[in-house]
Image (cartoon, rainbow, N blue to C red):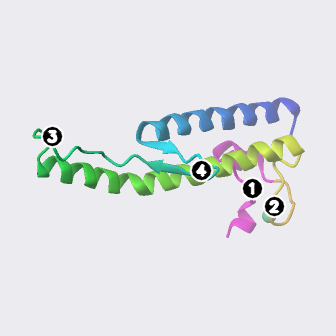
Amino acid sequence: MTKSDLKKFKEELEKTKTDLEASLNTFAKKDPTLKGDWDSKFPEYSREDPNVNLEEEADAVTEYLTRLPVEHSYELRLKAISEALGRIKRGTYGNCSGCEAKIPQKRLEAYPEADLCLKCKK
Ligand SMILES: [Zn+2]
């Protein structure tokens, strides 16, 4: 892998990271006590508010529940990306963390945060 390839992957990873964080920010907030953890915002209601009816409240809860798996998959992806950026820093990016073989560049292009070659992935 050349230096410019590495730079390309780094930029790609950083861009994806920013995009994911921006998407997460729309429905979750960063958990300040746990690094890399996000919490979906739970709808807040004032019981006194006469404009809130039960149906709306139920919809909001349903929406919250459908977001949880999305939040989880984003978190996992962000974690993988941070680890990949760490490997770039340490100069081990593109090496399989299972067998230490080089991960084919085609695979990295499809999946820049990959840390296993296809053989180890199985
Ligand atoms: Zn491997």
Q: Is residue 71 magenta?
A: no
Residue tagged 1? 115
Residue shown at 40% from the left, 46% from the top? 41
* Foreground pick, 95 / 118: 95
Q: Is mark 4 within 8 Å of ligand 1?
A: no
Residue tagged 3? 49
Q: CA distance from mark 2 to mark 1?
A: 6 Å
Q: Are marks 2 and 1 in contact (CB under 8 Å)?
A: yes
Q: CA distance from mark 3 to mark 2?
A: 55 Å
Mark earlier in primary sequence (3, 4): 3
Q: CA distance from mark 1 to mark 3?
A: 51 Å
Amino acid at pointer 4: Arg
Q: Secondary structure at mark 4?
A: helix
Q: Secondary structure at mark 3?
A: loop
Q: CA distance from mark 2 to mark 4?
A: 17 Å
Amino acid at pointer 1: Asp
* Foreground pick, 33 / 12: 33
Amino acid at pointer 3: Asp
Query: In the figure, 28 relative to 61: above or below?
Result: above
- What is the x, y in percent for residue 58? 19, 54
As drawn, the label of residue 77 is: 4
The magenta stretch is 103-122
Residue tagged 2? 97
Residue shown at 75% from the left, 60% from the top? 117
